[in-house]
Image: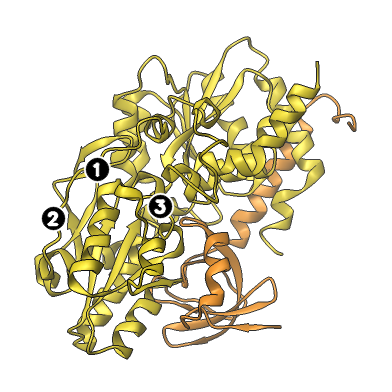
Chain colours: A yellow, B orange
Amino acid sequence: MKYVDEFRDHDVARSLAKAIREEANTGKQYRLMEFCGGHTHAIFRYGIQDLMPENVCFIHGPGCPVCVLPMGRIDSAIKLVQENDVILCTYGDLMRVPASRKQSLLKLKAAGGDIRMVYSTQNALQIARDNSDRQVVFFAIGFETTTPPTAVVIKQAKAEGLKNFTVFCNHVLTPAALKTILESNAADINIDGFFGPSHVSTIIGSKPYEYFSSHYNKPIVIAGFEPLDIMQSTLMLLRQLNQNRSEVENEYSRAVTREGNLKAQAQVDDIMEVSSEFEWRGLGVIPKSALKIRAEYSEFDAEERFTIPYVHANEIKSCLCPQVLRGQKQPTECSLFGTTCTPENPMGSCMVSSEGACAAYWSYGRFRQTNQQAQP
Amino acid sequence: MVPVDFFSTATHRDATIGALGMCLAIPALVISVSNENAKVSLNGVMVDVSLALVDDVIIGDYVLVHVGYALNKISPQEAELTLKMFAEAGMLTSDPEPNS
C-alpha cells in the first residue's frame, strides 16, 4: 500500500537503528515521551524499543482519548440512557471502558439500553434521521483529530432542522495536556524531548508546539505513525539534544504543515469554544483544556437539553492508569496488569483502548519480556 | 474489490472500529469525487468518505481517512523528501548493520 509499505522497510529500519545508536553513544540518558497512543502502539507493534540502545527510553504519554476520559463522564452517559431513554451513539472504543459500580456501556446495552456503536459521526446523524420519534445523543470524545467530524454533523443537523439530535461533547485539547505534563515534569518523569502527535497535528499544524519548545526548552519532533517515521524522529530528537537545540521539527511533513488544516479549524471554531475546565483521567482538572458547544448551537448540546450532572468517580484503588498516563509508571509495574486486568476483562482504561499503553504492552510487550528472561 | 459503505450502521463493522483506533488515519487513494463525498480505495477496499474537511481533492490524490472523513491530502513531494531523509541518515553510519 502506497505511503505505508515504504515507511516500514526492513533495511532502512536497520540502517536508521544504527544511526540512532551512533548518535546516542554519548553516555547520556534520553527519555523521550510519545504523546500519542498511536505512537505507543507502533513502538510495540514493530518492536522499535528493541532496536534502541539502552540509554534511549520511550515514555508513554496521555494521548489516548479513551484513556484520559474520566470515569465520571461514562457514568454521566450511562445515566443519560437510563433516565432519558435516549439512543446513545458512540465510537466502539468506549463501549468496554469500566464505569463506576462495575458498569460499562456494553453491559448497559446487554441489559437493554439502546446504545449504538458508530464508525462515523455521519452514522449517528443518520440514526437521528431514521428515528425522529426518539432523542439521539452522540457521545463525542477525542482530540483535535476527531473534533472536526463532530462539528460537521452539528452544522448539518442545524441545516436540516433536526430536533432530536444532540452531542455530549467531551473533546479535549492536546496543547493543554502537553502544558500540564511540562509544568509537572517532576524528577520521576524527567522528559528530555517529545514526539508530537501525527494526526492531531494534521489539523492544528506544528505552530502550537513552538511555544512549548522555546518556553520549556524541550525539543519536539512531529512524527508519523509508521515505524520508520518514529525511528527517524528519534534520530532527530537525539540530534537536537546533542546539539543543545530545542526546536519544533516536522518529520511528518507529507501530512502536516505549520498552519494545519485551516478549513477544519474554522469549522470547529464556528461550532465550539474552549470551556473553562475539564477533568482528565490521570492529569486532574485542567483549565481551558476542552471544547464545549457554543451558545448559538445549544439546541444540539446534550448537556443543555438534558440534565447531566457530573460526579467525580474514584478510580479502582490498585489501578495505576493515572500514573501510567502521566508517564510515571510503566504498565508492567501495576499489580493488576495481566492478572485481573486484561483486554478481555479490563479494569482500567489503558487496557481497553487499542491505543492504551497497557493494551500495547499486553498485545506485544509480553513477548519482549519472555525473550529478555530467556537471555541470561 | 469489496464495496464498503462506512456510513451504513451495520454492526459487522465493529471489528474495523477497534482496528482503526481513535486517532489513527490511513492513507487512501481517491477513486471518484461527487460533491462533499469521495469514493476511496483503502488497499483495494472501496470506502465512501466525506470531503467536508478538505478542499480541492481530485481523483488520484491520496488522503488520510479518519472516522469516515478525509482529514488531509498527502503531499507526494514531501513524502519523497522524507524517504530521502531516511536514506541519508542510513548512509551516514560507518557500515551497514550485520544481519542478526
Distance in Å between CA atoms under marks 2 and 1: 12 Å
Same chain shared by disc 2 and disc 1: yes
Asked whether the beta carbons under mark 2 and mark 1 sit within 8 Å of each other, the answer is no
Q: Quadrant of residue A263?
A: bottom left
Q: Nearer the viewer, residue A363 or A246?
A: A363
| Horizontal side of residue A115 vs A313, given as left or right | right
Q: Nearer the viewer, residue A347 or A94?
A: A347
| Residue at horizontal 30 percent and vertical 70 percent from the top | A138
Q: Amino acid at mark 3?
A: Val
Residue A250 at least partly seen: no
How many badges with numbers are in the image? 3
Mark nearer the N terminus (2 vs 3):
3
Instruction: State which chain disc 2 sits on.
Output: A
Where residue A124 appears, as percent x and y from the top left, is 35, 77
Asked whether the beta carbons under mark 2 and mark 3 sit within 8 Å of each other, the answer is no
Asked whether the beta carbons under mark 3 and mark 1 sit within 8 Å of each other, the answer is no
Q: Amino acid at mark 1?
A: Ala
Check disc 1 and report the residue beneath it: A313
Check disc 2 and report the residue beneath it: A309
Same chain shared by disc 2 and disc 3: yes
Check disc 3 and report the residue beneath it: A97
Q: Is residue B2 above or below residue A105?
A: below
| Residue at horizontal 68 percent and vertical 15 percent from the top | A25
Same chain shared by disc 3 and disc 1: yes
Q: Is residue A18 above or below residue A154?
A: above
Where residue A196 appears, as percent x and y from the top left, is 46, 41
Distance in Å between CA atoms under marks 2 and 3: 20 Å
